[in-house]
């Protein structure tokens, strides 16, 4: 039976099925719905959103339902406008408790109709399990309230930019909503709390809910992806130091920063020529393998429209993004049932809200994160009592 939930928070339980709303006990044999929700955790449910590649209800609404869908959207938009005017924080409420039943019934019905349309017209894709597993991790992050403490910035309120930031942050709900389909390469985008654009000078307002933040990030992730796609062995040490000592022969490349700048200035500019790097890293071979007919198809089978100029950029960035997300899912599985949780992620950096009772897990988490489908990547580990004061931790 097709059904819908109205809120993805674990304790906000309400189900629409067969023309009724159930708020205490859901009917049996619920099998198909639009999207994952922590409020309805049942094995064997199929999710339409991941049959159609993560597209939205708007994108998947068939023409015959468009008028009805537009009508219910107007009702929902009016509701959201009223909550903003009333300064209600939706994360503090169950969504269905704020809407009248007649709106919920209409909303549930058309979501059911769009869901049925998807299942009738789409086959289960090969990346279905990955998309669903990622949705589960991102939903868990979304429903965790951040511990925001602005007191470290009070001494800097004489600074105009700090005052502007504090004014802005006061009106932002302390939750991170990641979007898995926000970019063509698979990199996450985020709304609500601006984790992806938060200035480093303000990171110290973010504190763990447990004991410390534990951060794991890859050493030169995109360059390591390039090496893996070329079949090269991963250096155990820092890649840029390895390049400096093993690839560059000229005296002018004396420091790690010089080596790093040199390789990235070359890597993503197809017109750039560097005879040493051209020999060591065959860009043309990677493009030839993954770029055909106006599109790239990555190691993880993500297809992206591209011209030849952007092909290598998309291949490497998309592969690195998908690799990271798969490793994040593996870490989330290892933390299931533990007090530590994934707090958030930042590009190729994974931040865990770490509980001291889980300290015996650190080595295992490091090993899980480092062991990828493209080889074993060097992982940097940092920890700190706030996100602005992270220091290297030995593992």
Image: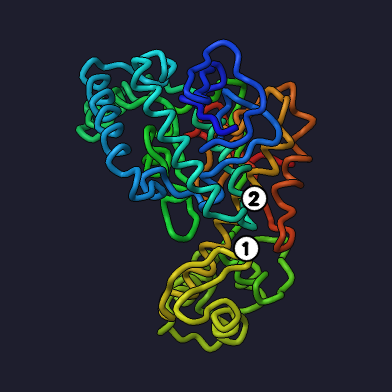
Q: Is residue 372 above or below residue 258?
A: above
Q: Quadrant of the C terminus?
A: top right
Q: Quadrant of residue 213?
A: top right
Does residue 284 appear in this view? yes
Cβ–Cβ under 8 Å for marks 2 and 1: yes
* Image x and y of residue 390, in percent: 55, 36
* Image x and y of residue 231, in percent: 71, 75
Residue assigned mark 1: 300
Residue assigned mark 2: 326
Q: Earlier in the sequence, mark 2 or mark 1?
A: 1
> Of residues 345 and 112, which is closer to you in this image?
112
Q: For marks 2 and 1, give the CA distance.
A: 10 Å
* Image x and y of residue 330, in percent: 70, 44
- Label 1 secondary element: loop
Does residue 250 appear in this view? no
Q: Is residue 87 above or below residue 194?
A: above
Q: Is 165 left, or right, of 118 in this rendering?
A: left
> Of residues 102 and 350, which is closer to you in this image?
102
Q: Quadrant of the N terminus?
A: top right
Rendered residue at 56%/46% (across/down): 349
Rendered residue at 77%/33% (across/down): 361
């Amino acid at each position: 039976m097709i059904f819908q939930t109205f809120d993805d928070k674990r304790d906000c339980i309400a189900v629409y099925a067969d023309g009724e709303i159930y708020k205490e006990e859901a009917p049996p044999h619920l099998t198909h719905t639009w999207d994952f929700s922590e409020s309805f955790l049942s094995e064997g449910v199929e999710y339409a959103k991941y049959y159609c590649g993560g597209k939205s209800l708007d994108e998947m609404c068939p023409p015959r339902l468009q008028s009805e869908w537009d009508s219910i959207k107007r009702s929902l938009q009016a509701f959201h406008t009223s909550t903003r005017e009333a300064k209600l924080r939706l994360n503090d409420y169950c969504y269905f408790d704020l809407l009248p039943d007649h709106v919920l019934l209409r909303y549930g019905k058309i979501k059911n109709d769009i869901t049925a349309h998807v299942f009738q017209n789409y086959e289960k894709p090969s990346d279905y399990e990955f998309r669903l597993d990622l949705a589960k991790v991102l939903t868990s992050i979304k429903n965790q309230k951040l511990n925001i403490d602005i007191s470290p910035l009070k001494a800097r309120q004489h600074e105009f930019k700090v005052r502007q930031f504090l004014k802005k942050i006061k009106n932002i709900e302390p939750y991170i909503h990641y979007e898995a389909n926000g970019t063509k390469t698979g990199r996450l985008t985020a709304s609500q709390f601006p984790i992806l654009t938060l200035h480093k000078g303000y990171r110290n307002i973010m504190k763990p809910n447990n004991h410390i933040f534990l951060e794991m990030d890859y050493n030169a992730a995109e360059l390591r992806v390039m090496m893996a796609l070329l079949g090269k062995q991963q250096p155990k040490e820092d890649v840029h130091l390895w390049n400096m000592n093993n690839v560059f022969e000229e005296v002018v490349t004396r420091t790690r920063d010089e080596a790093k700048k040199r390789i990235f200035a070359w890597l993503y500019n197809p017109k750039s020529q560097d005879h040493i790097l051209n020999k060591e890293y065959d860009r043309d071979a990677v493009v030839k393998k993954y770029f055909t007919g106006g599109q790239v198809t990555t190691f993880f089978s993500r297809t992206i429209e591209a011209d030849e100029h952007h092909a290598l950029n998309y291949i490497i960035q998309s592969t690195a993004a998908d690799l990271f997300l798969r490793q994040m899912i593996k870490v989330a599985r290892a933390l299931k049932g533990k007090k530590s949780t994934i707090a958030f992620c930042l590009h190729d950096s994974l931040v865990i809200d770490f509980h001291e009772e889980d300290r015996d897990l650190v080595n295992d988490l490091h090993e899980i994160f480092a062991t990828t489908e493209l080889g074993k990547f060097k992982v940097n580990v940092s920890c700190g009592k706030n996100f602005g004061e992270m220091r290297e931790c030995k593992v």
